[in-house]
Amino acid sequence: MKVKDSLKNIRKDLLKEIDSIDSPMTFYNVQYKIASEIIEGENNYRNTFLEEYREHVLLLRNYGDTLPFRILSPYTIQKLYDVENKLHFLSDDKDNTLNILNKAKEYAKKGSIVIVGFVTNYINTCDILVCDDIENPITINLEKENSWENIINLSNIKKEKEIHILNSKKNIDLAKKEILNRHKYLKEESISYNFKVVNDVVKRCLKNEEASGVIDEDDVIWAFQYKGEIPEMPKSISSKIKNYKLPVVGCHFRVLDEPELMISPPTCWPIDFECRFLLMEGNVALMHYIDAEGFKKSNKPENFVKDILYRNGKLKKNCIVVENNNKEKIYSCKVVNSVVYGYSNIGETANLIINYGMKA
């Protein structure tokens, strides 16, 4: 078997294990496997310089990103991410890597749900994240010299007592069960219409090399089997988007390449396993086209999207102007990204910021 195919099979088995997590220990074991594969991949790349091993290491962390996004909100994840913190080779400091893994295992054995930062792209401001309280997870950083633990929650309150006292809190077992159920991939009947279209389009793409679908008159998608270049756009798509007043285009590859977008990877999407896996692997490219003017359709007399700001045909960083009871507020392009890359519904997202506001 070719190296590329062998590594791909490892990642496929990994996703199956992620989907089967049902306890704090299995949650930890998946991360131990990711870390071990990263170290082996780094060493193999040093020895062979085969590009397949470098890609394997990068993809492993993309799969690792599934864990925080399945149990934490993007807002919480954003507080744990620092764009200036760069990834490092785990094999360069194997002793420290194993020390962090062993400490995480201790907490997992006590029943805590832990995320090891270095198996993800996003949790890069701490060594270990304890997620028994998903609204206020606890960060742990280990000091190399004396194995001392700096334990702080996201409100910057230092925890003087051992973390395992959390397990004595009333109903904590029920809370953990709820968190794990939130993590576990379950395709439910309540799946949004947008993702039903995504699932259908990707499935048809796997059979016919490409496929397209219409979510709404200002929202269309196109999937194709990616072989190194973009094929000619179908007329059904080009004829649709030529009428868009303010077209915004996105490809799901950007979600995998740019953590700062704060968008969950395809492994978290409520679609079929094979669709999620091949989107993660880059075998299928998913293009999304929306007309940003669609945000104005949910307007009400007192609450409405007043304007979409752009320059030279591109959205500004802060681009959605909302007027709510004669008060004006500008939202960032993260709102648009949640639709283009996260497949939120344009109308529902517009209603959310008009009526309730959102962190953006």
Image (cartoon, helix red, strand yellow):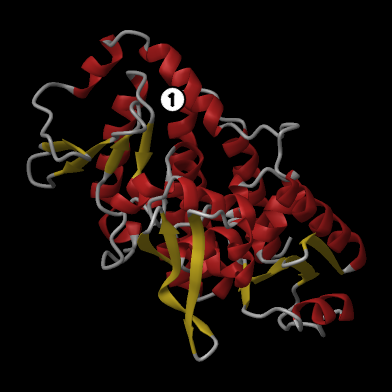
Residue 214 appears in the picture as rendered? yes
* Element class at badge 1: helix
Image position of 332 (left or right of 20): left
Relative to 239, residue 58 above or below: above
* Number of disc labels: 1
Relative to 67, residue 61 above or below: below
The percent coordinates of residue 54 (x first, y second) are 50, 69
Which residue, as the protein is rendered here, is positioned at the far bottom?
312
Q: Quadrant of residue 115?
A: top left
Which residue, as the protein is rendered here, is positioned at the far right?
208
* Towards the viewer: 188 or 308: 308
* Towards the viewer: 351 or 195: 351
Q: Residue at x 29, y 35 (%)?
A: 137
Q: Which residue is mark 1?
A: 24
Quadrant placement of the N terminus:
bottom right
The percent coordinates of residue 65 (x first, y second) are 47, 50
Relative to 334, residue 145 above or below: above
The percent coordinates of residue 273 (x first, y second) are 73, 45
Quadrant placement of the C terminus:
bottom left
Q: Amino acid at mark 1?
A: Pro
**Mark 1 surroundings: few (<14), some (14-19) or many (≥20) residues within 10 A:** many
* Towards the viewer: 348 or 57: 348
Q: Quadrant of residue 83?
A: bottom left
Q: Residue at x 21, y 23 (%)?
A: 163
Residue 42 appears in the picture as rendered? no
Image position of 129 (left or right of 235): left
